[in-house]
Image (cartoon, rainbow, N blue to C red):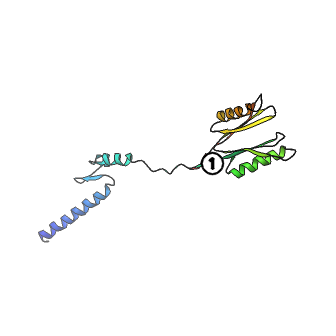
Amino acid sequence: MKPWLSITLLSVLFFLSMSSRAQQCGYGAQNGGQCVPADQVPGYQDSMQDRQAQPKQRPPIRWADRWGAIAIDDTSSVGVSENQTSKSAAITEALQRCALKSNNQSCEISLAYYNQCAAIAWGTKYESTAGALDEKQAQENALASCSQGAPNCKIVYTACSLPVRVQ
């Protein structure tokens, strides 16, 4: 065999063995024929920190409104609804509940509200409804309004229909 052919054949075999070793290193790097773990490759830590520093995009938060309603008739029958998905559903339920208790079927919506709280204050022959962002404020608003029209007002009902996170 000719010497130049032997040297060429050996060179090809050497390069083939080096390329198979490079493929075996996986996420590391080859240094002089040996695999080096990825965290020992210069610049690897910097690139990892850059990838971790970028905030992940989160989908926007979505909220669904919730409705409530209060229906009252002239004989002091009351119907209420809470946590309904629409204004019409809240009103319909409050009117139906009021009608079940009413003798003369004269129920009317006193308050329809969404994403907040509501309260009923009752005094001597007078009632008042009010809404607010929290129960305490709704009660204070109802009492203040009731006190302008009657003595001895008391809170008789409080509820909240708060938004629900859907995403």
Q: Using the image as rendered, state which of residue 62 and residue 108 is in the foreground.
A: 108
Q: Which residue is painted at 75% across and 48% down in the image?
A: 93
Q: Position of residue 17 (x, y in %)?
A: 25, 61
Left or right of 150? Residue 18 is: left
Residue 132 found in image quarter: top right
Q: Is residue 82 visible?
A: no
Q: Which residue is mark 1?
A: 65
Q: Residue furthest top?
A: 152
Residue 69 vs 10, above or below: the answer is above
Give above or below for 146 relative to 70: above
Q: Nearer the viewer, residue 28 or 94?
A: 94
Determine the residue located farthest toward the right in the rendered image: 103
Q: Is residue 39 left or right of residue 87?
A: left
At label 1, the amino acid type is: Asp
Vertically, is 22 above or below 79? below
Which residue lies at the image location 33% right of the left edge and 53% below the top edge?
27
Residue 126: image location, x then y, percent: 79, 35
Q: Nearer the viewer, residue 88 or 75?
A: 75
Q: Position of residue 158 (x, y in %)?
A: 71, 36
Q: Residue furthest left?
A: 3
User: To which quarter of the image does residue 145 belong?
Assistant: top right
Looking at the rendered structure, the secondary structure element under dot 1 is: loop
What is the x, y in percent for residue 2?
12, 71
Q: Can see residue 43?
A: yes
